[in-house]
Image (cartoon, rainbow, N blue to C red):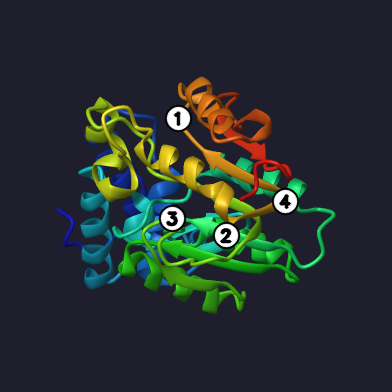
């Protein structure tokens, strides 16, 4: 059925039907349009302008192959190879997490903390696609930004994104702080793995396709957060800030970790959905080592 040469409007309608049947979710017209735009190399306005245009057999076949991939649950960001974050279109791959809007809360709070600092030195830990580091570099071109990740594949994607947007970020392969020697920073940000090892969400939705090493961190989900928070004081200047993203149900535990590590002014901020998502803390003169 999908080998015929469809009209654009007919192809979109059929794709919506297939996606809706597969997921039992709301109609997926936007996703269908995005997939067709990807196949044709056009914008959505083109589809609206030329709904009666007939696709070639090859175009129809390629389009419905993508529709079937989406129908199996593969994230549309991986199919398209891009996701927008902070107004920047970023390349993504199965080697990286898909940037999410809630993580923009972390960027917003970091920008607040460095607002009065000239040429701030910033570290993004577990950078993945580079989303957080690049957003900060975009907003603060005077900043010196280092982004680290253990995955060399993820760093390759992050470097591509930095080059695409001509943003100056130093990418470094590192197991958290291991490759940073004696460097100190005015701000450290991180969206590390924080899902519990046996959380059922790992077998649902987009998470099924994302790298497990970037999602899950030990039995309680706090293994990487614990390591980052405990070690961060050695890498922070006086009056510098650490900001981490965490699970909606981890705020109390994360605040406790901050206080045990000697941070002051510890506070948790809500994400766009109203969930406690980002905890911050400051190093004072007595805590910095």
Quadrant of res 235: bottom right
Q: Residues within 10 Å of mark 4 (few under 14, many from 20)?
A: some
Residue at 29% x, 29% y: name it. Answer: 201
**Residue at label 3?**
126
Residue 54 appears anywhere in the view: no
CB atoms of marks 4 and 3 within 8 Å: no
Q: Find the distance from the CA under tag 4 to the CA under tag 1.
A: 28 Å
Residue at 35% x, 45% y: name it. Answer: 13
Question: Viewer-nearest of labels 4 and 1?
Answer: 4
Quadrant of res 195: top left
Residue at 48% x, 34% y: name it. Answer: 246
CB atoms of marks 2 and 1 within 8 Å: no
| Above-or-below relation of 255 to 71 | above
Q: Residues within 10 Å of mark 1 (few under 14, many from 20)?
A: some
**Residue at label 4?**
238
Q: Find the distance from the CA under tag 3 to the CA under tag 1.
A: 16 Å
Q: Find the distance from the CA under tag 4 to the CA under tag 3.
A: 23 Å
Instruction: State the residue in front, 135 or 83.
Output: 135
Label 1, secondary structure: give it: loop
**Residue at label 2?**
123
Q: Is residue 66 left or right of residue 187?
A: left
Q: Position of residue 81 (x, y in %)?
A: 37, 63
Label 3, secondary structure: give it: loop
Q: Is residue 271 left or right of residue 15?
A: right
Instruction: State the residue in front, 26 or 154.
Output: 154
Question: Viewer-nearest of labels 2 and 1?
Answer: 2
Q: Position of residue 46 (x, y in %)?
A: 52, 65
Residue 12 appears anywhere in the view: yes
| Above-or-below relation of 224 to 117 | above
Q: Earlier in the sequence, mark 4 or mark 3?
A: 3
- Give residue 247's mark: 1
């Amino acid at each position: 059925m999908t080998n015929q040469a469809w009209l654009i409007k007919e192809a979109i309608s059929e794709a919506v039907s297939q996606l809706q049947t597969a997921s039992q979710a709301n109609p997926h017209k936007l996703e269908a349009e995005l997939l067709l735009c990807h196949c044709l190399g056009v914008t959505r306005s083109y589809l609206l302008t030329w709904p009666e245009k007939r696709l070639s057999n090859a175009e129809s076949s390629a389009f419905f192959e993508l529709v079937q991939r989406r129908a199996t649950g593969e994230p549309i960001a991986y199919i398209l190879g891009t996701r927008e974050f902070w107004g920047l279109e970023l390349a993504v791959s199965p080697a990286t997490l898909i940037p999410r809007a809630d993580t923009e809360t972390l960027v917003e709070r970091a920008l607040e903390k460095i607002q009065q600092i000239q040429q701030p030195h910033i570290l993004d830990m577990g950078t993945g696609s580079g989303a957080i580091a690049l957003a900060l570099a975009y907003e603060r071109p005077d900043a010196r930004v280092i982004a680290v990740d253990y995955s060399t594949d993820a760093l390759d994607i992050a470097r591509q994104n930095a080059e695409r947007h001509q943003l100056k970020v130093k990418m470094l392969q590192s197991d958290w702080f291991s490759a940073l020697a004696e460097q100190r920073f005015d701000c450290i940000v991180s969206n590390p793995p924080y899902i519990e090892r046996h959380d059922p969400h790992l077998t649902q939705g987009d998470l099924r396709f994302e790298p497990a090493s970037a999602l899950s961190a030990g039995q309680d989900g706090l293994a990487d957060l614990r390591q980052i928070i405990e070690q961060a004081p050695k890498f922070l200047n006086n009056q510098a800030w650490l900001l981490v993203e965490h699970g909606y149900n981890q705020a109390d535990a994360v605040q406790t970790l901050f206080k045990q590590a000697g941070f002051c002014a510890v506070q948790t901020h809500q994400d766009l959905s109203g969930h406690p998502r980002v905890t911050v803390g400051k190093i004072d003169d007595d805590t910095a080592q």
